[in-house]
Image: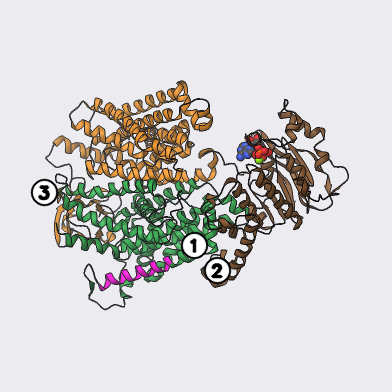
Chain colours: A green, B orange, C brown
Amino acid sequence: MDWIQILSNTAESILSPVTFAFVLASLGLALHFGFAGLLNFGIAGFMAIGAYGYALSILRFGFPWWAGILVSIAAAIVFAILLGAPTLRLRGDYLAIVTIAAAEIARLLFLTNTFDDFTGSASGLFGYHNSFREANPLPDGFYGLGPFSYSSTDWWVRIVGLSLLIVVIWLLWALTRSPWGRVLKGIREDEDAVKALGKNVYAYKMQALIIGGVFGALGGVVYALPSAINPTVYVTSLTFFIWTALLLGGAATVFGPVLGSIIFWVLQAFLTNVLPALTQDGAILEGLTSQQGSTLRFILVGIGLMLIVIYRPQGIRGDKRELTFVK
Amino acid sequence: MQLSKTGKRTISAIAAVFAAMMLLLALPVSATADEVGAEFENQIIGNVRVAGEPVEGAKVSVTGNGYSVSTVSDEEGKWSVGVPVVGVYEVAIDRTTIPEEAPIEEFGPLTRQVEFDLTSTVIANYYFGEAEREEVGILAQFLTRLVYGINFGLMLALASVGLSLVFGTTKLSNFAHAEMVTFGAVIALFLSSLNINPFLAILLAVLASGAGGLAQDVVIWRPLRRKGLGIVQLMIVSIGLALTLRYIFQFFIGGSTSQLPSLGGETFNFFGTLTLSTTDIASMAISIAVLISFALWLTMTKTGKATRAISDNVDLAAASGIDVDRVVRYVWVAASALAGLGGILWAYFRPGIKWDMGEKILLLIFAAVVLGGLGTAFGALIGALIVGIMVETSTLILAPDIKYVGALIVLIGVLLVKPTGLLGSKERIG
Amino acid sequence: MSNNEPVKSTGLHIGDAKPGVAKKDPILVADHVTRSFGGLTAVDVEHLEVPRGAITALIGPNGAGKTTFFNLLTGFDTPNTGEMHFDGKSVRGMRSHQIAKLGQVRTFQLTKALSLLTVLENMKLGAGNQLGEGILKSLIPSIWRKQEAEIEERAIELLNRFKLSEKKDDFAASLSGGQRKLLEMARALMTNPSLVMLDEPMAGVNPALTESLLGHVLDLKKEGMTVLFVEHDMHMVRHIADWVVVMAEGKIVAEGPPDSVMEEQAVIDAYLGSHQETDLGVVTGRVDASEGGEKQ
Ligand SMILES: Nc1ncnc2c1ncn2[C@@H]1O[C@H](COP(=O)(O)OP(=O)(O)OP(=O)(O)O)[C@@H](O)[C@H]1O
Ligand SMILES: [Mg+2]
């Protein structure tokens, strides 16, 4: 086994756009679930809206890349309002079912052949990079150190992703330590009590749903920045993986989701590299096919999610005093 | 079996005749695509069609990441290529291998980029031109879809009543329930691979599903109830369990679709468009018989009545001497056995068994349960029939690949219009 | 309790003390308010006026509709029919937070402490018109920092009064049941209300704490607030209430100053209706927690 290569591949996942996308989406989910107690099971839908909003506005309407990002944000706001307006006054589990169903509807509509001309159906979207790459201020070439060596284009993707990330982390941090965040936490604990104190709970929940949804959409944009959009990505499993990353780090924290997503992807990358290697002759998992080896990592994700929720519901960075689960 | 289903899907008599001829000629044409790189986990797959008709022998080449390979499409127009690493690939189709009349310009560039993300399969379809719709009487079409819808709805009902009962008795929204649907089918597949009589295999698989439910309750759910986990926490545990089980299935049966052995029998044709095999008819009969027995169990037996008492009010039921844990265990066994049976029947209906087949109908099961009223088994039965019929009949207007969308929109609509009857009554304030 | 007799407000009403009697200066007026659940009419109040600046007790047997009436008055539930005015303003159809903003704040029968917020955060949440609660302004601390400090000061003052200041950095989840009742009341006061509505503030609170809670309620009146509270403890009602309203089966069956209303036949009937065998002394005396806590 080539450990150097494995470790290098693993380390590389820290700066990968997919990891950034996960961090962004799980920060959105942290605002939804960790701070406001909203059960959003449709974060993959927000990501799909973000990714498609970006690519479609460039491909079909000739927008520049930055306008594509603005379109994504606007689309996520509309999606959040559509989801939230009817459900945010109802009990929490309604939002769970409505969001998961809405995310599936969005995915199926992007996937169907019916709108193939517009959405590219099962083949997804590609070739929307010109405007983004032209804006790249870095000269052509290959830069970096060790595992973190990328072409100028790849660096540009990472720089933009990281910048979005920093803005979003600051936003979430600033929002949640403010009196606004206090109201949100109060709503998470008991919305009737907060209503009785004269706060417009519905408006706060809507604001949280919108902002977290926009974070998720930005995750979708970053996912789409480097190469192509593949509709098979935005399935409910993606939502569940992001929940895993969130709960791993700590739902009611700002840096928890960051840490959780990085750990999630570092582990994924490590296992992706190690497990197939372990199935080779003479290794521990000899006798399994390399495909079975790599399927193991998703089995581990599932088991990991169960163990976290049962034994450490507050996550790695959660407050130890919070022995109970949020909500 | 496979044959009649193909006919069903396409509603195209021509396709059915074509396929039948192929079979009659018994040409040594492989049923699946030319297997290039089948040893690799990551697959690029696709379809080639001109005006909806599959194109055989179209040459597709895949290049990228220092790897280059080509393949040809099979008689269903399908092709697949395995690649060693994930990443971006260029897929190109050879113009000379596509029929002259194909509207290439309309389609756009023949070379395209695909990329692997979270999944191990990416799709690159080449559909040239619109499929021509067969003109069949609208009534005949509707009746056909209605019958398929009832059949599908009955299978959905088998899965849904269990989910609803589990919710009623434990307040758990069990996301892993759909995995029990897959479980039944996978066990049936495993047993039939041992050359057991297929009917016996099905029976054993249903029993194994029941045992799986028992194991779940004993190992996971009862201890967690004792531990006092909240409902959101339990729900997320069930998501973890669903992921675990789903990928365990993939671990054992891989990413491809497998078929249960044919049960024999004949295929009957009604008013031109509706084809039903003996298996279809038997499947409906079994569903109905099982659902009726289950309803009798719920209403007539002591345990059945206790189940409903617990759904109404756990504390009251416990106070009046019902052993809640014991009843909940029965519920788990019954729910899982029913789901397993539903999975086996569905495997014949779809047709085929795939590791993520349960996930595909999870939301439909939820839709059925919510539609009928969470926690009430009879509501779930009605809800499942409505959802099944809606999904199938919606294909008269909608493209088949968005047939689930209508059902999901109705799910959301119902939640909004009549929520209290569905997820229990409005909670008391203060 | 007798060594510290509170000063009772008298002369609150105009004319005879009968159900629906007019008050000299009503702060809250309800007309024809009904609410039914299926076949059951939980609330059917013809007319009620709550006197300003006084302590009014709402009493009645379990299931009389007191909590439901509270819910209707505070916008947590919608009446089937009827009109409600607070401070001369119609509040029918207003949402709960809008009503709370008018200065009509309530507590809940089942205490709602915000468990995973600290005691101090619970308190600060109560303050109204916070600049930092707007989504955009929240991003710039310099806008709200000064106000936040003032709020904190007021919160600590109140916590001192309610003897909770030592707990200020603990999660509310760690408080005892009685302490949560205190916290909920203190939090309600952070809104600077003109009418405080307390749903069974004494239930589950031990006798030692009852004394101080009574003191707090009397203080509210001294500060010019109006109090409307639901209570099963007749001792407390007699001790601090200036006016008593009796509900039974959704209707107001009697009204009057505490001493006279307890003697009324309608009140005795209301209580005895459901407790034929119980002696009146038990009914009007301190009700055991076990009895007071029974729920429908
Ligand atoms: N959400 C609801 N759905 C159905 N019935 C309700 C609901 N809320 C209250 N009720 C019924 O309305 C009646 C009045 O209840 P309410 O809680 O107002 O009584 P209460 O006077 O506060 O009693 P207690 O002194 O026990 O608190 C009861 O019969 C109760 O069962
Ligand atoms: Mg009450």
Whole-angstrom CA distance, mark 2 to mark 1, is 13 Å
Judge the density around disc 3: few (<14), some (14-19), many (≥20) Cα neighbours within 10 Å.
few
Q: Which residue is mark 3?
A: A281
Towards the viewer: C148 or A188: C148
Mark 1 residue CB less than 8 A from any atom of ligand 1: no
Q: Residue at x 21, y 69 (%)?
A: A146
Q: Is residue A146 left or right of residue C291?
A: left
Q: Which residue is mark 1?
A: A176
Q: Is residue B355 left or right of residue B220?
A: left
Q: Report the predominant secondary structure element of the magenta stretch.
A: helix
Towards the viewer: A303 or B279: A303
Q: Chain of mark 1?
A: A
Is there a contact, CB below 8 Å, between mark 3 and mark 1? no
Q: Chain of mark 3?
A: A
Q: Which residue is mark 2?
A: C137
Q: Which residues are magenta?
A: A148-169
